[in-house]
Image (cartoon, helix red, strand yellow):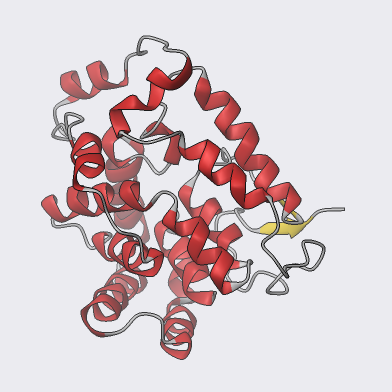
Amino acid sequence: MKTLRVLSAVLDYPTADLQAAAPELKAAVAAEGLLEGRGRAALDRLIDEIAAGDLYDLQERWLLLFDRMKTLSLHLFEHVHGESRDRGQAMVDLKSVYERGGFVPVTRELPDYIPMFLEYASTRPPQEAIALVSEPAHIFAALRERLAKRKSAYEAVMAALVALSRARLDAETLAALLAEPDHDPDDLEALDAAWQDEEVTFGPAATEACGRDSLAARLRQNARPAPGVDVGRAAGAGTEFTHSGHALRRGG
């Protein structure tokens, strides 16, 4: 699914290569036709904004949003496990999903980094890709709301992911995710407090706040091939949009 690959690229740290690829990214989304109407228009505006912007300003904006703000973290398990011990096992499980899919990340980013996760999903058959994206749909929805509150154009990426996931959002689960204090990025004292080490919890209690079983446990199911899917044959040859070194390569 090229649209997922585009969303992965657009959400990643802005680079000159990303700016230059803007026409190609928009064309790929249009050709695949999975996003229409306001959703596609909003994504096009974000891509145009990145293409036309000053690169240093774009990078600073990205860092203020996604690097400084814990509640806008682009690491999936930050929103599910926090600092619990379960987070480490969740990383191992997700890395296994990638490896069993025939791909190995060539990056220093953690396996749950959303652009990496989306790039992996983009290489899978459409039904499998949608199933993967649906697992963290509540996280994408929470990020969408927080970005909308900040009037950030990056809301378009999260809105597109929620739409593509086809997931039925549970109000209680979403409310639990949004209950995390969402501090002003300029309030450095509050941000320091938010990033302090949390109490380590063990077992199921680590994810009770989300009202569901562990995201990692559900993702683990995707390591098992779907009926009729040949795990040894990767869908989608090669990565068309590489960005910040987060491309995936074939294992082996």
Apparent side of residue 150 relative to residue 139 in the rendered image (left or right) = left
The image quadrant that residue 247 belongs to is bottom right
Residue that extends furthest to the bottom in the rendered view of this protein: 31
Apparent side of residue 152 relative to residue 95 in the rendered image (left or right) = left
Q: Is residue 82 above or below residue 151?
A: above
Q: Residue at coordinates 16% horizontally, 29% vertically from top-left?
A: 181
Q: Is residue 248 above or below residue 171?
A: below
Residue that extends furthest to the right in the rendered view of this protein: 252
Nearer to me, 137 or 17: 137
Q: Position of residue 151 (x, y in %)?
A: 13, 57
The quadrant of the image that shows the N terminus is bottom right
Q: Position of residue 228 (x, y in %)?
A: 73, 70
Q: Residue at coordinates 27% horizontally, 66% vertically from top-left?
A: 156
Q: Position of residue 138 (x, y in %)?
A: 31, 48
Q: Residue at coordinates 37% horizontally, 13% vertically from top-left?
A: 197
On the question of residue 105 being in view, the answer is no
Q: Position of residue 154 (x, y in %)?
A: 28, 60
Q: Is residue 159 above or below residue 200?
A: below
